Image (cartoon, rainbow, N blue to C red):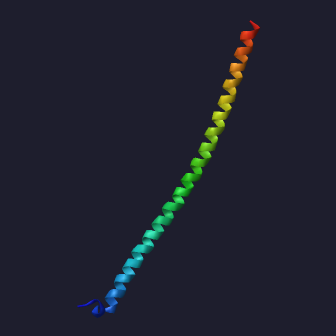
Amino acid sequence: MSQSEKDPYTELASLEAKLDTLIAQYNLMKSENKSLKVKQDALVKEKAKLLEKTTQAKARVEAMIARLKAMEHDS
């Protein structure tokens, strides 16, 4: 049976199955994309917090060094 002689109902059923598969894949990708965006937002916030903590720690260490140098010059 050639391509033009196939049963139209069989072709339609095949196309419907392919469309259902594509829709399922689309929904899965959409869900994964949403999940990745949520994770990315959380990581960006975590990075900002860590950067702030690092900056604060650096300032404290620099202040300690300055106090130590001042003590060294006083003695």
Residue furthest right in the image: 74
Which residue is pictured at 43% across the width and 69% down the height? 25
Which residue is pictured at 56% across the width and 57% down the height? 37
Residue 59, quarter of picture: top right
Count the marks: how many?
Answer: 0
Image spot of residue 5 (x, y percent): 28, 93
Q: Is residue 61 above or below residue 32?
A: above
Q: Is residue 47 above or below residue 5?
A: above
Return the residue nearer the eye: 66 or 48. 66
Q: Going by the image, does 39 lie left or right of 63?
A: left
Q: Is residue 7 above or below residue 43?
A: below
Q: Is residue 28 above or below residue 50?
A: below
Q: Going by the image, does 12 lie left or right of 29?
A: left
Q: Going by the image, does 45 lie left or right of 14?
A: right
Which residue is pictured at 39% across the width and 74% down the height? 21
Image spot of residue 72 (x, y percent): 71, 10
Which residue is pictured at 69% across the width and 20% down the height? 64
Residue 73, quarter of picture: top right
Q: Going by the image, does 46 lie left or right of 30?
A: right
Image spot of residue 70 (x, y percent): 74, 14
Residue 23, quarter of picture: bottom left
Residue furthest left in the image: 1
Work out which quarter of the rendered image holds the N terminus and state it.
bottom left
Residue furthest top in the image: 75
Work out which quarter of the rendered image holds the C terminus and state it.
top right
Return the residue nearer the eye: 62 or 32. 62
Image spot of residue 54 (x, y percent): 63, 34
